[in-house]
Image: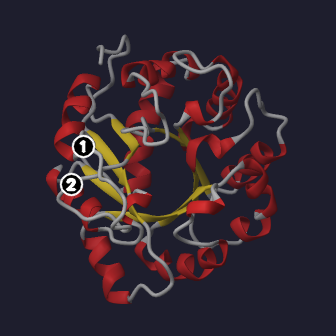
Amino acid sequence: MKKPAFKAPANSCDAHIHIIDPRFAPADPATTTAHGQSMDDYSGVRTQLGLRRAVIVQPKHYATDNRCTLNAIAQMRGQARGIAVVDTSVTDKALIRLHEGGIRGLRFSLWNAGNQVTSVDMIKPLAERIAEFGWHVQIHMAAGQILEQQTLLAALPVPVVFDHMGRLPPGSDASHPALRFMARLIDADKAWVKLSGPYLNTLEGAPRYSDVRSLARNLVTLAPQRMVWGSDWPHVTEAQKPDDADLLDLLLDWAGSDAARQAILVENPAQLYGFDD
């Protein structure tokens, strides 16, 4: 991995990574655990990019067993927070332990019906239970699914964080109905968006992802104070891994000012995930 052209400001945060550690058994015993995806491996990436903080998102590899994610948070000694995956059978004591371990939200990855760990009908009851912790729900849905669930998402008692720019189709801009819905939630102080996973929203591909540019710029212009950036390391969906330096350098194009990049990398994740200086 090369060094990025962009020099990240102090306390910058990678707000979307996954850790898969061979020390922890996968949810499906038939699954092979790939090497090179542990916290030790990510530490080199973090150093190369000049980042300090990270948000570790529970991977589907472990389903609702969050031990690996909690272990990874602990390894970063106060500079990491986490997003867990649970179902409605989770106990109140387990939620308290997750909070004490640095978890600040629950993820619902529903984009692919073939490998869902949770379901749409779990979102509301779990959101009601985590509201007292000040957590949020992180939603990984395609744009069409977001539109189908507008009423549910708008009525939740906790903020909504949209994964991977809402998974809008390549070439989308501010006129897309899903983006307009996301904008309404942002205006109501109820939503955030992750500027992550450009390779999930493109036909053109690396390193420029030019067909994602309009969407990313529209989002930053809409609400720079509600955007966070994530690398999505170790890019488990990609057979050809992108260079993480290229992904960070996209902010030079997407966010047109130092003030916007400071907000996206430092101030916004500090607020959303509860980091302090």
Residue at figure coordinates x 38%, y 67% from the top left: 28
Q: Amino acid at mark 1?
A: His
Q: Which mark is residue 174?
A: none
- Describe the element under mark 1 as helix, strand or loop: loop
Vertical relation: 176 (above or below) 173: below
Q: Viewer-proximal residue, 128 or 120?
A: 120
- Where residue 9 sits, quadrant-wise, is top left
Residue at figure coordinates x 21%, y 54% from the top left: 22
Crowding at dot 2, Cα within 10 Å, few <14 / some 14-19 / many 20+, comes out as some
Q: Which mark is residue 35?
A: 1
Residue at figure coordinates x 42%, y 24% from the top left: 248
Mark 1 vs mark 2, CA separation in Å = 7 Å
What percent of the width, then of the height, locates residue 241? 42, 28
The quarter of the picture where the N terminus appears is top left
Q: Give yes or no for contact between labels 1 and 2 (Cβ–Cβ under 8 Å).
A: yes
What percent of the width, then of the height, locates residue 19? 30, 50
Q: What colour-coding does the image apply?
A: secondary structure
The quarter of the picture where the C terminus appears is top left
Crowding at dot 1, Cα within 10 Å, few <14 / some 14-19 / many 20+, comes out as few
| Of the image marks 1 and 2, the number of the one nearer the N terminus | 2
Residue at figure coordinates x 16%, y 42% from the top left: 40
- Describe the element under mark 2 as helix, strand or loop: loop
Q: Which mark is residue 22?
A: 2
Does 100 sit left or right of 105 as displayed? left
What percent of the width, then of the height, locates residue 73? 23, 56
Does 4 sit left or right of 156 as displayed? left
In the picture as drawn, the residue positioned furthest to the front comes out as: 30
Does 169 sit left or right of 122 as displayed? right
Vertical relation: 37 (above or below) 24: above
In the picture as drawn, the residue positioned furthest to the top comes out as: 5
